[in-house]
Amino acid sequence: MVKGLYTAHTGMVNEMKRLDVLANNLANADTTGYKKEGTTSRTFADEMSFRLKDSSNAYMPKKLGGITYGVHLGQVYTDYSTGSFKVTDNTTDFAIDGNGFFAIAFTDKQGNTSVKYTRDGSFVLDNEGNLLTSKGYRVLGYAITKTDPNAGANKNNDDNIRPNGDVLYVESNSKTVASDEKLVSLKIPDKVIKDNGDKVAVKSFNISADGLITGVLETGEITALGQIAMSSFKNEVGLTDIGNNMYEPSGSSGAAIISSGKNSTAGRNSSGYGDILQGYLEMSGVDMAEQFTDMIVATKAFQAAGKTITTGDEILSEIINLKR
């Protein structure tokens, strides 16, 4: 009977953990791009086998007489399935229809900058035209290759986004090439600089399915401003959640696989990524009906385990009272 008490105890502890996960999912039901979490548990038979294979595992439940009893919470995992989309008609709202993550330049409190990843495309523009997340982190992508017309026979390729923040005019056509050798902060400026030095106002901008940003000038010309980079992972379930809808790679997820740029001569892999939808946001992946159903099941399982402990206590009390 003592074994039964410990077995029921493991059930109560793990159902509490399961309820914590469900509560977090429900709290984020309206969070843009949130991916729901789930739990897995080993069965009693699995624990017996697990005990025989690896007796040194630190995450085993209570062991009595050399045998493992009870339930063990296998893991808390993230479901990265694509959620439903909400129309916002906001030109800086983007959703990914399919596989992929946006790349973000994240700066920590110590001033160190690293690349993080998100599915939350609720972006904004600052007063300089930089494309930012809602938390103020810069969105990363590719500059557009521009050929210097004044270089003559020795002309060299140059990028349209300059370190000083200027953006050069590049005609957007079927031959537009994105420089995918490095990630840069994307910018949608008020004006672009033409070859003759004239500054021409950008009236509006659009994002194509492959992430290419084009601007319509006051002259009616179409200029390529940059391209949003997409990233994927061999095992996205292994990503580490760092909060604010951002993730970072781990040894389990592997390093980020960056999409190739528009008309890039590098190995083409852009077909493996989803389409970017402008004016849409990906909603939370939480199905509230499913979560409430799971909550009822977890609550009943917790109550059943608690009842087992109560019953075991009553039996032990009766055994003790037999001596009277």
Image: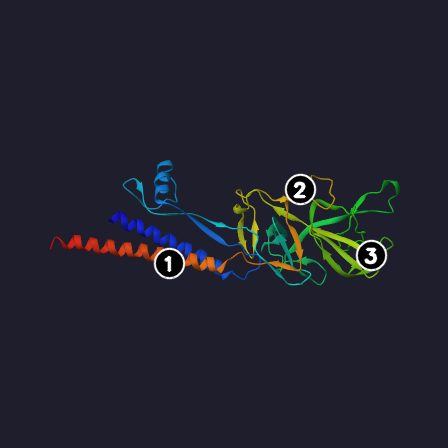
Q: Mark 3 points at which residue?
A: 221
State the image coordinates of residue 108 (x, y, percent, origin top left).
59, 54
Q: Residues within 10 Å of mark 1 (few under 14, many from 20)?
A: some
Q: Name the residue under label 1.
A: 299
State the image coordinates of residue 264 (x, y, percent, origin top left).
73, 43
Front-most of residues 238 and 150: 238
Front-most of residues 185 and 269: 269
For marks 2 and 1, give the CA distance. Answer: 46 Å
Residue 105, visible in the rendered structure = no
Residue 119 lies in what quarter of the image?
bottom right
**Residue at point 88% right, 40% down?**
153
Q: Is mark 2 on a helix, strand or loop?
A: loop
Mark 3 in CB contact with mark 2 (< 8 angstroms): no
State the image coordinates of residue 156 (x, y, percent, origin top left).
82, 43
Mark 3 in CB contact with mark 1 (< 8 angstroms): no
Give the residue type at disc 2. Answer: Asn
Q: Is mark 3 on a helix, strand or loop?
A: loop
Q: In this view, does 237 lie above or below 31?
A: above
Q: Name the residue under label 2.
A: 269
Residue at the far top: name it: 53
